[in-house]
Image (cartoon, rainbow, N blue to C red):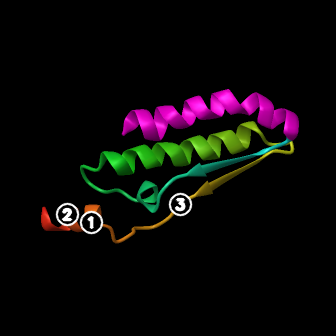
Amino acid sequence: MILTNIYGVGLTIQACLPALKRSKGHVLLTGSAAGRTTIPGSMYSATKWAVTGIGYNLREELRGTGMRVTLIEPGMVDTPFLMNRRSMR
């Protein structure tokens, strides 16, 4: 989860940023509402906190370049995974 949600975001930005700067492109990151609150014991929440931080820092780094950074943070979705988490409590 850490490799995908944090390291993967970083590697993708690193690989794409030169071309995006040339084209004044748009970086779109997928965070989560879980990255805006504390959920005890949740590594997922911690990784999405990191994505939020990456987005805010990247936005500042690119200020004045004509590029945009958007962070999408969807809320909870009622899925079988969420139902299993509820039953484990």
Which mark identifies residue 21? none
Left or right: 88 as drawn, with respect to 5: left
Residue extending farthest to the left is 88
The amino acid beneath tag 3 is: Glu
Q: Residues within 10 Å of mark 3 (few under 14, many from 20)?
A: some
**SS of the residue under disc 2:** helix
Left or right: 45 as drawn, with respect to 87: right
Q: CA distance from mark 2 to mark 1?
A: 6 Å
Q: Are marks 3 and 2 in contact (CB under 8 Å)?
A: no
Name the residue carrying label 3: 73
In what quadrant of the picture does the C terminus appear? bottom left
The residue sitting at 32% across, 67% down in the picture is: 79
Which mark identifies residue 80? 1
The amino acid beneath tag 1 is: Pro
Left or right: 14 as drawn, with respect to 46: right
Pick the front one: 2 or 55: 2
**SS of the residue under disc 1:** helix
Q: CA distance from mark 3 to mark 2?
A: 22 Å
Q: Hey, which quadrant is residue 23 in on the image?
A: top right
The residue sitting at 39% across, 69% down in the picture is: 77
Name the residue carrying label 2: 84
Q: Hey, which quadrant is residue 87 in on the image?
A: bottom left
Is residue 77 in sight in this rendering?
yes
Is residue 89 in sight in this rendering?
no
Where's residue 62, x and y in %?
A: 77, 39
| Residue 35 inside the magenta-drawn segment | no
* Residue stretch in magenta: 1-23
In what quadrant of the picture does the N terminus appear? top left
